[in-house]
Image: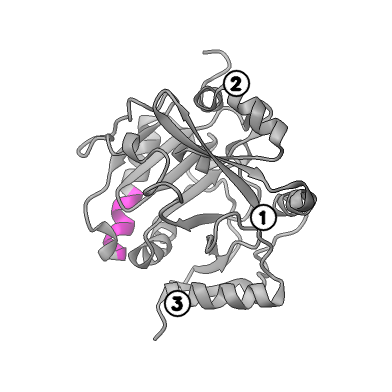
Amino acid sequence: MSTLQQKVVRTTEHALHTGALKSIDTQIEVIAENGIPFLLRTLANLKRKDNAAKRLKQAGETTHNPFLPYEQDLYVDELGEQHVCLLNKFNVVDHHLLIVTRAFESQENLINQNDFYALALCMQEIDGLAFFNGGTQAGASQPHKHLQLIPLPMTPFQPLPFSDALATLPTDQIGCADALHFNHAGIQLPEGIFDHPKQAAKHLTDTYLKLRKALELQDDGVLSTSAYNLLITRQWMLMVPRTAESAAGASFNALAFCGAILAKTPEQANNLKQHGLMQALQILTTSPSA
């Protein structure tokens, strides 16, 4: 029986061969601000930039649902009864996976235990960073509920730009990483939690709800009426409330809050560096009236 990782590799090779996979080329720069490293990606050289920008625009199209039906060439595997695993068609990182509800659910719906079970099935095999963009203000480009998973390490880091800071999250209660100067809450996860996906799903659900309560995020019982980002590794869970979709002329999704930021042009990248990357993250998570 093939492992999930083997299926990912095989599907990637097939999707590249058929042209179903449309990778977005970027150039990488490591930026340090007050001892905190960032990974700044900028769409690739002029020869390929127009193509990359076109693909980035396509990735944000919401005029049709790319998951109903999904492209068969991007299909990786079943994840329980309610989810499928797909390759991200417009990937910046190799082997970027989408964990998608089989039937339509809104991306603004609360994440539930079935969602976390599907994620845990993936993370049992793949050491990665999972993330969720809760609403358009949090960087969601598709309205159909999906979590995302990228493999670690995030080169050239071991494993993430903010790893050292996030390692300081508390282990026994909800808290903050002092070095990260944006609004957030997080906690360390029990060692080996993903060895048992059903138990992991229950623990992740409980922790998710505790984080929402700590940050005073609002919902109507089904939909989250507060925008937020969620990030999960095998070591920790982090939640970030969002009060703005963009700052310093750039749009941000969940990956920004582990230190990975995407700029569409060199001018946008330079503007971000002059503005301050951490300051941009503060703007994204601070109430305008604060």
- Residue 215 appears anywhere in the view: yes
- Residue 99 appears anywhere in the view: no
Determine the image quadrant of residue 163: top left
Residue highlighted by disc 3: 6
Residue 100 magenta-highlighted: no
Check the image and report above or below for 50 versus 220.
below
Circle nearer the N terminus (3, 2): 3
- Judging from the image, what secondary structure is the residue with disc 3 in? helix
Specify the label residue 24 is tagged with.
1
Q: For marks 2 and 1, give the CA distance.
A: 25 Å
The amino acid on which the numbered mark 1 sits, given as a three-letter code, is: Ile
The amino acid on which the numbered mark 3 sits, given as a three-letter code, is: Gln
- Local packing at callout 3 (Cα closer than 10 Å; few below 14, some 14-19, many 20+) is few
The amino acid on which the numbered mark 2 sits, given as a three-letter code, is: His
Q: Judge by depth and name the residue closer to the eye, 28 or 69.
A: 28
Check the image and report above or below for 253 versus 248.
below
Q: For marks 3 and 2, give the CA distance.
A: 42 Å
Asked if labels 2 and 3 touch by Cβ distance under 8 angstroms, the answer is no
**Residue at position x 60%, y 54% in the image:** 92
**Residue at position x 65%, y 64% in the image:** 67
- Judging from the image, what secondary structure is the residue with disc 2 in? helix
**Residue at position x 45%, y 51% in the image:** 154
Provide residue 39's location: percent of width, then percent of height. 51, 40
Image-based side of 28 in relation to 124, left or right: right
Residue highlighted by disc 2: 275
